[in-house]
């Protein structure tokens, strides 16, 4: 059950211009959070009416009860958060939302993240005990790369792409994924990397492409959706998104029924 908590910040540091990593102590969240879940943070003082801002849980340390979130300074709320210092209190609700599906049947997994979409995937890699973990991460350029070391540490193979080619593969991370999945072997047979499931988080067109590639290869695929939120706890319907169900459409709440959905449920063009 999510709780309203006031937790102590350990650090809040700028990793690259405009991207921050914030660690706080929370026994409650660190002991319960599952990869894919998020916390909803109060990003204002006093009675300001600004709504809480959702941030994915990027990693937890259950031994010392610490939780890490990372965020891009985007607008009023995250600008406020960027000014927080070690020792300040963080007013949050969490852990919230559903989580990535993990199963003993998935021996080999891949995560595909674009930009700030990489954060929840790090937590998934850290917690997942499967035999092989591939990490595809994409950024605009060399100057935007964050947490590369952490991804290296918790995956068996890391593949990095930058849009401008300043580091790693030049192009979209989905082009790199396609190259590796659709590699041709002898006699025109597809001989690429095999995964039991692919998890994706990032911009909608990126997740759409990942889902299309996974479907083509018969690989299961989950995506983590972003939506502007109100309450964050399933009560206001501000975060409704259209999903496919029994040959029809209906609406689900990203905050409560998501943020993680099976690729085939999602209306990527909606
Ligand atoms: C489940 C979930 C997990 C998230 N995890 C992270 C994370 O780990 N790291 C991170 O940096 N961000 C994450 N976000 C996005 C983050 O919540 C928004 O960037 C933040 O709320 C912006 O608040 P703000 O007040 O700074 O900007 P605002 O002033 O509210 O908005 C500034 C600009 O950002 C756009 N924007 C705001 N919120 C969203 C959103 N949810 N989706 C798309 N565009 C938005 C607005 O349209 C506007 O153009 C997540 C969102 C969701 C729903
Ligand atoms: S934000 Fe209120 S129902 Fe999702």
Image: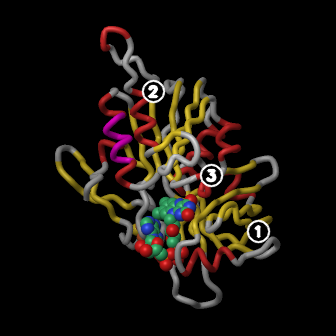
Disc 3 element: loop
Instruction: Please tell me which residue lies in front, 100 or 140.
Output: 140
Where, quadrant-wise, is the C terminus in this rendering? bottom left
Q: What residue do we see at 25% from left, 49% from top?
A: 244
Q: Residues within 10 Å of mark 2 (few under 14, many from 20)?
A: some
Magenta stretch in the rendered image: 207-213
Q: Are marks 2 and 3 in contact (CB under 8 Å)?
A: no
Numbered badge on residue 9: 1
Q: Earlier in the sequence, mark 3 or mark 1?
A: 1
Q: Residues within 10 Å of mark 1 (few under 14, many from 20)?
A: many
CB at mark 2 closer than 8 A to ligand 1?
no
Numbered badge on residue 33: 3
Residue 170 image position (x, y, % from top left): 48, 43
Which residue ends up furthest to the top in the rendered image? 187
User: Residue under circle 2?
Assistant: 196
**With 173 as the anchor, is 240 left or right in this view?**
left
Residue 156 image position (x, y, % from top left): 63, 29
Indicate whether 250 appears above or below 53: above
Residue 98 image position (x, y, % from top left): 49, 51
- Which marked residue is nearer to the observer: mark 3 or mark 1? 1
Q: What residue do we see at 52% from left, 48% from top?
A: 162
């Amino acid at each position: 059950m999510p709780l309203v908590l006031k937790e102590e910040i350990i650090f809040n540091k700028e990793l690259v211009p405009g991207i921050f990593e914030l660690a706080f102590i929370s026994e409650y969240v660190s002991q319960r959070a599952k990869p894919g879940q998020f916390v909803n943070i109060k990003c204002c003082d006093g009675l300001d009416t600004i709504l809480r801002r959702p941030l994915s849980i990027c990693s937890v340390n259950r031994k010392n009860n610490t939780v890490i979130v990372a965020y891009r300074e985007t607008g009023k709320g995250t600008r406020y958060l960027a000014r927080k210092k070690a020792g300040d209190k963080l007013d949050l609700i969490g852990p919230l939302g559903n989580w990535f599906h993990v199963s003993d049947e998935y021996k080999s997994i891949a995560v595909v993240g674009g930009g700030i979409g990489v954060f929840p995937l790090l937590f998934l890699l850290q917690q997942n005990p499967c035999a092989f973990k591939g990490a595809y991460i994409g950024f605009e350029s060399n100057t935007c790369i964050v947490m590369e070391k952490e991804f290296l540490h918790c995956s068996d193979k890391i593949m990095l792409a930058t849009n401008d080619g300043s580091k790693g593969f030049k192009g979209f991370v989905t082009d790199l994924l396609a190259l590796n999945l659709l590699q041709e072997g002898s006699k025109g047979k597809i001989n690429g990397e095999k995964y039991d499931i692919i998890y994706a988080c990032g911009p909608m067109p990126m997740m759409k492409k990942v889902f299309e590639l996974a479907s083509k290869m018969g690989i299961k695929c989950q995506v983590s959706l972003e939506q502007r939120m109100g309450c964050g706890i399933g009560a206001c319907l501000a975060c409704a998104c259209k999903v496919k169900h029994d040959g029809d459409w209906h609406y689900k709440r990203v905050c409560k029924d998501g943020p993680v959905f099976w690729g085939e449920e999602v209306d990527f063009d909606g």
